[in-house]
Image (tube, helix red, strand yellow):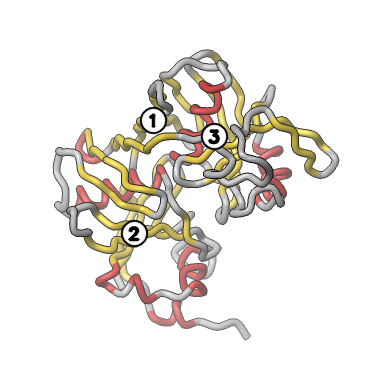
Amino acid sequence: MKFYKYHALGNDYIVLRADDGGDRLSTEQIVRICHRNFGVGSDGILLHCGRDATGAFLLRIFNPDGSEAEKSGNGLRIFSRFLWDRGEVKTEPFSVSTLGGTVECLVQDSGRCVTVDMGTVSFDSTKIPVAGPAREVLREKITIDGVEFEYSAATIGNPHCVLVRDKATEEEAQRFGPALESAPRFPNRTNVQFVEILDRNNIKIEIWERGAGYTLASGSSSSAAAAVACRLGLCDREITVHCPGGKINIGVRPDFRILMSGGVTRVAQGEFYEEMLSWRSE
């Protein structure tokens, strides 16, 4: 089975095609492929499933724990670059359909930069979802390991918990991210962003990604964090998000529709050996 590896600011994905056999992989095999010692190693798998009746490209996204994600901003940029490298798209906008909705993408700078219209952010608890009565989830309290945090929640096709901090640190993301991801108030688990406001047009984030763990960059996390910062009045509508792996540019429209732009790098391509996929520990 052929594979293609890319990264978007250090957030790396393996792209597979369903018609090459990618749609027959078991959860265990997905976990093995993503493992950085026993497989190729990646933050997830992007599965190209052809096109639908409208012409939109069909994309399925798998986390390294084998679970399926609704949407990934970096994944969408990588998938767009893959389509461009294969000659399936050119310089005109095109649509990609995910579990989290259909988005419009545009490849620029000879494939090195991709812009994605990510859709509209919602803070509605019933859409995210967040347990409790229907409401906008803004500036609420949650206690993790005896520490009280203020958080806001949002969805852009997948769930996010955004915590504005005086300083955003990897240490906090690693320490509190796992418990926040699986906190009972988030029925579908959640992605977590620790956000530091640098100025009206710049924020820094540290990311704990649902199903993947600590992550160097995330397009959907950048989108959600920027939207929350704007909704709380902490930032303007053009925001540069500083991730550990690099910068993502976010435009927040008045209706909270998000335009995301960022870089993509082609890493490698090759073939899986059967013994890697069928290996069993003693």
Q: Indicate the quadrant where residue 143 lies.
A: top right
Q: Which amino acid does label 1 sit on?
A: Arg
As drawn, the residue found furthest toward the front would be 133
Disc 3 crowd rating (10 Å Cα; few below 14, some 14-19, many 20+) is: many
| Mark with earlier residue (2, 1) | 2
SS assignment at label 2: strand
Question: Disc 3 marks which residue?
Answer: 123
Q: What is the CA distance from the residue labelled 3 to the residue labelled 2?
A: 31 Å
Location of residue 280 in the rendering, given as x and y in whole percent from the top left corner: 55, 83
SS assignment at label 3: loop
Residue at position x 15%, y 38% in the image: 91
Location of residue 163 in the rendering, given as x and y in whole percent from the top left corner: 65, 32
Does 275 sit left or right of 191 as displayed?
left
| Mark with earlier residue (1, 3) | 3
Q: Indicate the quadrant where residue 232 lies.
A: top right
Labelled disc at residue 156? none
Location of residue 205 in the rendering, given as x and y in whole percent from the top left corner: 57, 31
Does 49 sit left or right of 216 as displayed?
left
Residue 190 visible somewhere in the drawing: yes
SS assignment at label 1: strand
Residue 217 visible somewhere in the drawing: no
Q: Quadrant of the C terminus?
A: bottom right
Question: Disc 2 marks which residue?
Answer: 15
Q: Which amino acid does label 3 sit on?
A: Phe
Question: Disc 1 marks which residue?
Answer: 257
Disc 2 crowd rating (10 Å Cα; few below 14, some 14-19, many 20+) is: many
| Mark with earlier residue (3, 2) | 2
Location of residue 98 in the rendering, given as x and y in whole percent from the top left corner: 36, 53
